[in-house]
Amino acid sequence: MGPMLQRTYPNQTCSIARALEVVGERWSLLVLRDALLGRRRFDEFRANLGIASNVLAARLDRLCSEGLLERRLYQTRPDRHEYLLTDKGRDLAPALLMMMKWGDRYYPHPGGPPRVAVHGGGCGGELDDQLTCRRCGQVVGFRGVEIRPGPGLAGYESHS
């Protein structure tokens, strides 16, 4: 095995570097994406991500210890937990949405975007990169965004 990458950036006085110390590990943002899409249970994360159980357990522990997810018991005998987004975790939604939009623009899926951001509250119009609704013209705040399956997701549901 090669040298371990450091998780900290001690010579960087930078908010991006500090954020990467928490969510910059491989899989962390995808676990948060899945939590934002409504997944809560270990098996749901594992099945959707195709991630090794030990790696997933480590990411979930880290995200819980940093306060982005909350671990809650939902079953006893055997004990089973679900992982719920905290406000701190939910506050990453705008960054993930912008990353999704960036990926759609520069690394598009041949079948179209796997997920689309639409104006919630009944309008349903697709949102552009500035979160302006293409149907009604309204600039939508992040709380008014809905993420729906897009044309590129067909046949790829397990790795959305």
Image (cartoon, rainbow, N blue to C red):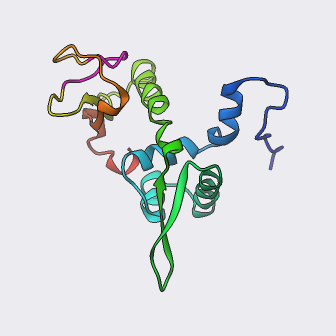
Percent position (x, y) of residue 156?
33, 45
Q: Is residue 110 left or right of residue 64?
A: left
Quarter of the picture holding the C terminus: top left
Expressed as whole percent of the image width and height from the top left, the position of residue 159 reads 40, 47
- Percent x, y of residue 72: 49, 66
Viewer-side residue, 65 vs 152: 65
Outermost residue, front side: 87
From the top left corner, tell me how far across and down residue 82 is, in percent.
46, 64
111 shown above or below 139: below
Predominant secondary structure in magenta? Answer: loop
129 is within the stretch colored magenta: yes
Residue at 57% in and 63% down:
53
Compared across the picture, whether 33 is left or right of 38 comes to right
The residue sitting at 42% across, 58% down in the picture is: 40
Task: Verify whether residue 74 appears in magenta.
Answer: no
Residue 58 placement, left or right of 152? right
The residue located at (14%, 33%) in the rendering is 122
For residue 115, above or below residue 140: below
Dividing the picture into quadrants, the one containing residue 111 is top left
Is 39 or 5 nearer to us in this picture?
A: 39
Q: Residues in magenta?
A: 125-132
Taking the spot 80% from the left edge, 45% from the top edge, the residue there is 4
Query: Could you tell me if residue 116 is visible in this image?
Result: no
Q: Which of 135 and 104 is in front in this view?
A: 135
Q: How many marks?
A: 0
Res. 153 visible in picture: yes
Residue 140, relative to residue 10: is it above or below? above
Residue 116: quadrant of the picture: top left
